[in-house]
């Protein structure tokens, strides 16, 4: 199942994420992507905060719609054009229930593992992994098909970590290397008995001098060639049952050129 879900409300006020997702969709020119409508509840500048989460009601409404659409289709695999990282709680928890030994590869500059009460921004796109662990806002738990364990999380490109996130990473012994070592990553996954993967790809994992059309720009990231090689090797060694491309904000097709191979690898 291929899904177009340009959620931006999880970023707080990052409305540029929605047209950025549309640019990726237009580039792929693939009619099999199913659009999931966003909520019409006020968000962003006019949004309300509940449970220490900005735009809470809008996020709940549209993520419920996403979950219903996936459950109705009951797909074997998922490919998602988004949108902000908060949307991941639905597809990852769905696939985790469906497949044993799922590994989650989190290509991202950010850890996205805050509790709402610990988040300085109160933006949900910094909370999906904590939610998936079953340690987030309890009112969001009905959106989860299952919860994951900290041993299933593997970061790639991580370099911007909040203090409380680092504590949770340390407590869970979560794989979070300072530099990418693909051979080491593959060995760790195999040693854990992981056979299925979900590849979350936030484009801010990349070095901004390679690609800077992202919602956040964090220096010292992955080079595009490194990311491409990592994806290719993971796809060869494991069954990739889900993947996403998230938080690119350009509206110019020509500006996607540096990342088109990554998009093709993950979405085709």
Image (cartoon, rainbow, N blue to C red):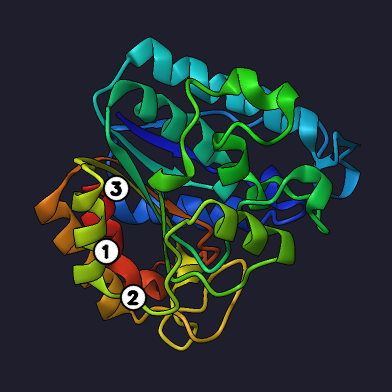
User: What is the CA distance from the residue labelled 2 to the residue labelled 3?
Assistant: 32 Å
Up/down of 90 relative to 217, above or below: above
Q: Is residue 51 left or right of residue 83?
A: right
Residue ID for mark 2: 180
Residue ID for mark 1: 185
User: What is the CA distance from the residue labelled 3 to the residue labelled 1?
Assistant: 33 Å
State the residue in front, 109 or 169: 169
Q: Comparing marks 3 and 1, which lies closer to the viewer?
A: 1
**Circles 2 and 3: CB atoms closer than 8 Å:** no
Quick one: label 2 or label 3, which is nearer the N terminus?
Answer: 3
SS category of the residue bearing label 3: loop
Q: Is residue 263 left or right of residue 35?
A: left
Quick one: label 2 or label 1, which is nearer the N terminus?
Answer: 2
Up/down of 215 relative to 116, above or below: below
SS category of the residue bearing label 2: loop
State the residue in front, 61 or 41: 61
**Circles 3 and 1: CB atoms closer than 8 Å:** no
SS category of the residue bearing label 1: helix
């Amino acid at each position: 199942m291929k899904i177009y879900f340009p959620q931006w409300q999880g970023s707080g006020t990052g409305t540029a994420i929605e047209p950025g997702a549309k640019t990726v969709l237009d580039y792929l020119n693939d009619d099999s992507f199913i659009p999931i409508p966003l909520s019409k509840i006020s968000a962003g500048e006019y949004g309300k905060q509940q449970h220490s989460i900005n735009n809470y009601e809008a996020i709940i409404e549209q993520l419920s719609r996403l979950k219903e659409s996936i459950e109705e289709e009951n797909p074997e695999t998922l490919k998602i054009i988004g949108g902000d990282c908060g949307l991941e709680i639905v597809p990852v928890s769905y696939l985790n229930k469906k497949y044993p030994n799922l590994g989650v590869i989190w290509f991202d500059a950010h850890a996205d593992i805050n509790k709402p009460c610990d988040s300085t921004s109160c933006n949900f796109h910094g909370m999906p992994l904590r939610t998936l662990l079953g340690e987030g806002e309890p009112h969001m738990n009905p959106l989860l098909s299952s919860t994951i364990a900290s041993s299933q999380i593997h970061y790639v490109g991580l370099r911007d970590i909040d203090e409380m996130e680092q504590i949770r990473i340390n407590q869970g012994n979560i794989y979070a290397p300072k530099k990418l070592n693909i051979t080491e990553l593959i060995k760790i996954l195999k040693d854990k008995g992981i056979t299925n993967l979900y590849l979350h790809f936030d484009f801010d994992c990349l070095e901004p001098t390679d690609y800077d059309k992202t919602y956040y720009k964090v220096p010292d990231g992955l080079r595009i060639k490194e990311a491409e090689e990592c994806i290719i090797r993971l796809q060869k060694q494991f069954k990739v049952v889900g993947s996403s491309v998230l938080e690119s904000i350009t509206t110019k097709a020509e500006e996607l050129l540096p990342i088109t191979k990554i998009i093709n690898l993950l979405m085709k």
